[in-house]
Amino acid sequence: MQKDKLLIVDDEHEIADLISLYLKNEGFQVFKFYNATDALRCIQTEQLDLAILDVMLPDISGFTLCQQIREQYHYPIIMLTAKGEGMDKITGLSLGADDYMTKPFEPLELVARVKAQLRRYKHYNANPDHKDEMIVLSGLVLDVKAHICTLNDQPLSLTPTEFSILEILCQNKGNVVSSEDLFHKIWKDEYYTKNNNTITVHIRRLREKMGDSYENPKYIKTVWGYGYKIEE
């Protein structure tokens, strides 16, 4: 079986080396770099499955690197942020990252998050048993098997997390899906809590890509104090 290929970019050598060791022990193929310039060469030449990016890099920021990846690729991105830098987390998610971890962190938790992201990513690349391979709703078309989304015949470039949220809401059209249920359906991991603002940021990013209005949304509607829904 071919190993999943993971990219690590962090200028703190000890952290990058430690992450690499843990992931290699789990059977992953790891490409490790201490700057973004070298990482970019790898991104263009290797067929990667996931990237772990530190925000603070010596040449260009992890945010810029995240943006450049998202211009061409849909594989999951996990950002590493400094303790207390709340805006870094929101910025990273807004630019297309799927998850973030705050330093210092437990390596085993990072491994768990990597596996969770890969499960979801692989789910969209190959899942012949999915109950709804095509979802059509008010000009919105989701090809679940191919992980392709169009709105009014225009393609939408969605991250795996954004696609997953949209798929869940469409499958439950007309019904409210709580933020807690979204956490469970997407990640199925205990480290996500009701206080996590990840879903909120991803919903905002989805609305921007869909040209949807926060005040008067056509597609994703907020049900205050509970969650979100899509109506046909």
Image (cartoon, rainbow, N blue to C red):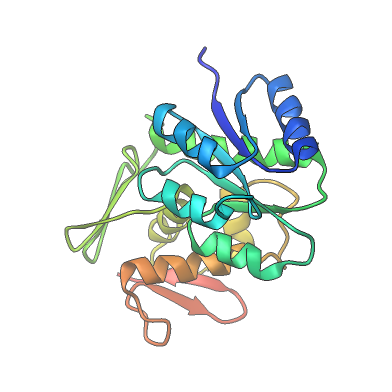
Towards the viewer: 14 or 216:
14
Most extreme residue toward the left is 153
Q: Quadrant of residue 85?
A: bottom right
Most extreme residue toward the bottom is 215
Tell me residue 20's x, y (percent): 71, 29
Tell me residue 196's x, y (percent): 69, 64
Most extreme residue toward the top is 1
Tell me residue 77's x, y (percent): 55, 46
Does residue 138 sit above or below 147 in this rendering?
below
Does residue 145 sit above or below 136 in this rendering?
above
Tell me residue 194's x, y (percent): 71, 65
Whether residue 151 sits left or right of residue 52 in the image: it is: left
- In percent of the image, x 42 and y 82: which residue is there? 214
Q: Quadrant of residue 129?
A: top left
Towards the viewer: 168 or 92:
92
> Which quarter of the rendered picture does the C terminus lie within?
bottom left
- In percent of the image, x 44 and y 27: which residue is there? 46
Towards the viewer: 224 or 213:
213
Most extreme residue toward the front is 59
- In percent of the image, x 57 and y 60: which residue is there? 92
Examine the rendering and report whether any part of residue 43 can be seen.
yes
Does residue 202 sit above or below 31 in this rendering?
below
Whether residue 210 sits left or right of residue 99 in the image: it is: left
Whether residue 213 sits left or right of residue 86 in the image: it is: left
Q: How many marks?
A: 0
- In percent of the image, x 79 and y 61: which residue is there? 83
Examine the rendering and report whether any part of residue 129 can be seen.
no
